[in-house]
Image: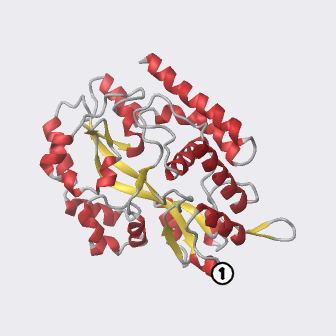
Amino acid sequence: MNEAVAIGVASGAGPDISYVSGNTIMRLTHGGLHAGLAEPIDDFLAQSGLDRRILPPLLEMVRYDNKTFGVLFIMWPIMEVYNLDLFESAGVAEPTTWAEQLDATRRLTRVNAAGAVEQWGYQGPSMTAVYAFYLLGRTMEQLGRRLIEPEADRGSLTNAEAQQAMYYLHDLYRLGMPDGRAGIRFPQILENKVAAFHGSLDSNLMNSLSTTNLRLEFRRFVKPAGGTDIVQCNVGTLYLLSTSKNKPEALRVLEAFMQPNNLKGYYMAAPHWQPVLQVHFTDADILSRPYTKGAMRVLTEPITTYGPKHPLLTEMYPSAGAVLAPAILGQTPIESALEEAERLMNAAIAEHRRRD
């Protein structure tokens, strides 16, 4: 989509408004090949009152350099999902810390005499480059240190927080998925064989959960000792192109689309998307949708962006994440992986800055 927009702009036929996932909007503002495509819209947000109606932590996700670059209209929280029946039948309390989660995962994982896994204590995302980078970013943030600051030209992975986060992720995957097949597998979840899993309220999850009577509940990512619990969130964002030839009309379209009744109709037709306007968090019709009320309960601060908030996120993660992923799975040493991932991440940033 970004490529199509860029081609349209270059040919003089670009759109006035386009869509982007909020965790990558900074590549359209201050970094990446398409920097400068998104226009700041703070005056519009203030005049329309949207800056006061959108849940503040969500709006912060599309702010950079004291400017706001998009209108949020949908969001999906990223959290953990617990099968309460499996916890209760095993006499395992819900964890509140990393240490308790690792212990619960160990106790809830069952392997038979032949070595086959009969019950998974935890299932996390497939260990691809992007997930490895995002997971490390979240767990480091829970420890009080960012993988990279939003405005920084360098990140640091050779520190105590990065090591602690990596060893925690490694242990969680090893204990929860001893078959070595990282990834969330809905056949097993729906067969009542997974105690907890990393969940995002997207259409795939919602469609799968709608076919089962399992007692599943959403939970925040539990805290490390001395750190904080957290929930991640991604947001669907409409942005005004800096090259728009019809800015006043385009902004009127955005304002009309964001009227509470219009958005409510959208949410009722697409129940896997969650609201962004504060008025909808108490709307009885929206809360009556499957799983929405449970999702709303976890949306207390701190809420963090899905993936580090940095203009060059999409330039950094492919090489750095590819090195981190096998280390989380125990295939390579963690310390050397962190050193190499830091080098690759910073080299990608330096190369892009050099081209600028």
- Residue 252 vs residue 45, the one in the foreground: 45
Residue drawn at point x = 32 percent, y = 61 percent: 275
Q: Quadrant of residue 26?
A: top left
**Quadrant location of the N terminus?**
top left
**Quadrant location of the C terminus?**
top left
Residue drawn at point x = 60 percent, y = 61 percent: 98
Return the x and y of residue 90 as percentages of the image width and height. 68, 79
The total of numbered circles placed on residues is: 1
Q: Quadrant of residue 279?
A: bottom left
Residue drawn at point x = 30 percent, y = 35 percent: 65
User: On the picture, is 331 further left or further right than 131?
Assistant: right
Return the x and y of residue 22 as percentages of the image width and height. 38, 45
Q: Quadrant of residue 44?
A: top left
Residue furthest front in the image: 226
- Colour option used: secondary structure
Q: Is residue 327 above or below residue 123?
A: above
Instruction: Kindly state the secondary structure of the residue where label 1 is placed.
Output: loop
Reading the image, the residue beneath label 1 is 91
Q: Is residue 182 above or below residue 332?
A: below
User: On the picture, is 37 further left or further right than 92?
Assistant: left
Return the x and y of residue 156 as percentages of the image width and height. 55, 35
Residue furthest right in the image: 114
The type of residue carrying mark 1 is Gly
| Mark 1, other Cα within 10 Å: few <14 / some 14–19 / many ≥20 | few
Q: Is residue 69 above or below residue 170?
A: above
Return the x and y of residue 343 as percentages of the image width and height. 60, 28
Residue drawn at point x = 63 percent, y = 61 percent: 123
- Residue 246 vs residue 230, the one in the foreground: 230
